[in-house]
Image (cartoon, rainbow, N blue to C red):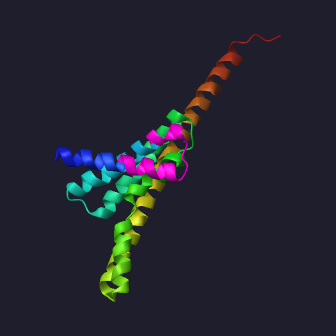
């Protein structure tokens, strides 16, 4: 089991870094992008190993990629999409889409329709997980900004009250 975890972690990291190189992610962001992809894939993989269906597992993987991308963007001072685009690649159901195409070409329409529906649901789950992470971050930063503004208003009010009139 430990060997499987190591293999899954390594390949998801290196696949993400390789895709990042392919789409010209800045060198200083490649490691963080690899970590983002590894977090998303390992979230998905552990949930599938626990018996969770692929659709909610992909949702959680997309959520993980989005959240780790936001953390990395704060740490590296780079837009989060630099980490998120390559980070989502390991979750993309490419093999299932290929199998759906093969089923279509072989004339097995019922099986092909089922596989296509599965691919669409998985892609939608990944997208929804990512969107939820963006909404969570927006709420977090709005709360943080409002907290800072309230503190500044309080300090300005104290200053105005303590200031002597001319």
Q: At x 24% / y 57%, what residue is drawn?
A: 48
Give, as a single range, the part of the protein colored magenta: 13-32
Q: At x 33% / y 82%, what residue is drawn?
A: 103
Q: Quadrant of residue 45?
A: bottom left
Place of residue 113 in the rendered image (x, y in percent of width and height, measured from the top left):
35, 82
Q: Is residue 72 above or below residue 12?
A: above
The furthest residue to the right: 166
Q: At x 26% / y 48%, what residue is drawn?
A: 7
Is 26 one of the magenta-colored residues? yes
- The image shows a total of numbered marks equal to 0
Place of residue 25 in the rendered image (x, y in percent of width and height, measured from the top left):
54, 46
Place of residue 149 in the rendered image (x, y in percent of width and height, measured from the top left):
62, 31
Is 19 one of the magenta-colored residues? yes
Quadrant of the image containing the C terminus: top right
Place of residue 39 in the rendered image (x, y in percent of width and height, measured from the top left):
36, 46
| Left or right: residue 42 compared with residue 159 | left
Identify which residue, 38 or 7, lies in the foreground: 7
Identify which residue, 87 or 50, lies in the foreground: 87
Q: Is residue 5 above or below residue 166?
A: below
| Left or right: residue 26 compared with residue 47 | right
Identify which residue, 60 or 26, lies in the foreground: 26
| Left or right: residue 128 compared with residue 4 | right
Q: At x 52% / y 40%, what residue is drawn?
A: 27
Q: Is residue 115 visible?
A: yes
Q: Main secondary structure of the magenta part?
A: helix
Identify which residue, 150 or 51, lies in the foreground: 51
Q: Is residue 72 above or below residue 123?
A: above
The furthest residue to the bottom: 107
Q: Is residue 135 visible?
A: no
């Amino acid at each position: 089991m430990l060997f499987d975890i190591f293999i899954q972690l390594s390949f998801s990291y290196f696949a993400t870094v390789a895709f990042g190189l392919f789409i010209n992610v800045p060198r200083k962001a490649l490691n963080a992008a690899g970590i983002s992809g590894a977090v998303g894939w390992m979230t998905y993989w552990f949930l599938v190993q626990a018996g969770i269906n692929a659709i909610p597992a992909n949702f959680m993987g997309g959520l993980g990629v989005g959240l780790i991308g936001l953390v990395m963007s704060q740490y590296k001072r780079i837009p989060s999409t630099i980490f998120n685009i390559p980070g989502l690649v390991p979750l993309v159901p490419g093999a299932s889409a290929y199998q759906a195409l093969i089923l279509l070409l072989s004339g097995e329409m019922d099986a092909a329709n089922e596989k296509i529906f599965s691919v669409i649901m998985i892609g939608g789950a990944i997208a929804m997980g990512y969107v939820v992470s963006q909404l969570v971050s927006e709420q977090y930063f709005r709360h943080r900004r409002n907290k800072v503004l309230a503190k500044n208003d309080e300090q300005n009010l104290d200053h105005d009250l303590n200031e002597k009139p001319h």
